[in-house]
Image (cartoon, helix red, strand yellow):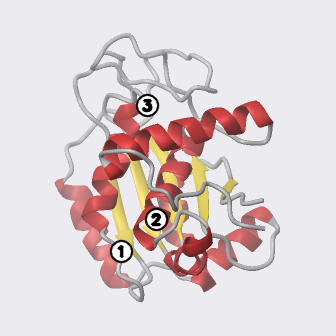
Amino acid sequence: MWCAIELLPTSCLRMSVIRMLRISVNLLARLAKMNDSRPKVQASRRSGGDGVPEVFCSDEQGVISVPLDECRKLALAALMHEGVRGACELSVFFVDEATISELNSEHMGKIGPTDVLAFPLDTAEYNEAQGPGTPSRGPSRPAFDTDDVPTLLGDVVICPAIAMKQCEDHAGNFADEIALLLVHGILHVLGFDHDLEDEKTEMRAHEVAILMEHHWNGPVPSGFRQEQDE
């Protein structure tokens, strides 16, 4: 049975993942420049803002072509679809097999590469959404003080090489595989899980709903599967 996600709560997510991914000096310079150009958000902010989430995508492997702009748009659409609003950020990293193997070993205690890892923010939770401009939490996260809205939602790390290897007996093609892994990871960041059968059913339903509306713009393709063939 396919289980793409490895779930790891962590704090200081962006810098932690950047360090683990061994990002090059040139990329760090670009990220620093990008950080300087972003709108500054206060660390503590009340709910009810009119902002939308920001998604940052970075290709760290450079071997298999990944449509970063499409991934960013799908990630943002997935967040909005799930009711996430306000000044918050999600990062998506595409890495090689060696990097994701190292992360899998260091943080999950598992040998070898996996297709996707999710790093949800563990230092605060989101408040229930009360309107279209309200920062909101994932479905499994309890309410908290609205004066303490976090900036970072979390990080999703995807390995395109593994996605390429498994796509034919999973999502059907590479584009759909990347889209599925991305949405799957985002849902984990928002609090979804699939340990129990009812949780799995709910999570898969959300995956399909997001992909139908924001990726396929239509019905599910005949070759699409959410589990790999045995």
Against 58, residue 76 (above or below) is: above
Q: Residue furthest top?
A: 130
Residue bearing mark 1: 66
Which of pointers 2 and 1 lies earlier in the amino acid sequence? Answer: 1
Quadrant containing the C terminus is bottom right
Residue positioned 27% across, 20% down in the render: 133
Residue positioned 68% across, 40% down in the render: 193
Residue bearing mark 2: 178
Quadrant containing the N terminus is bottom right
Against 86, residue 210 (above or below) is: below
Q: Secondary structure at mark 3?
A: loop
* Contact check, label 2 and label 1, Cβ < 8 Å: yes
Left or right, 131 with reference to 197: left
* Residue 199, picture quadrant: top right
Q: Secondary structure at mark 2?
A: helix
Q: Secondary structure at mark 1?
A: loop
Q: State which mark lies toward you, 2 or 3.
A: 2
Q: Is residue 122 visible?
A: no
Q: Amino acid at mark 2?
A: Ile
Q: Position of residue 98 (x, y in %)?
A: 62, 85
Q: Is residue 148 visible?
A: yes
Q: Residues within 10 Å of mark 3 (few under 14, many from 20)?
A: some
Q: Which mark is residue 82?
A: 3
Q: Nearer the viewer, residue 42 or 194?
A: 194
Residue positioned 39% across, 38% down in the render: 79
* Contact check, label 3 and label 1, Cβ < 8 Å: no
User: Separation of disc 2 and disc 1 at Cα?
Assistant: 8 Å
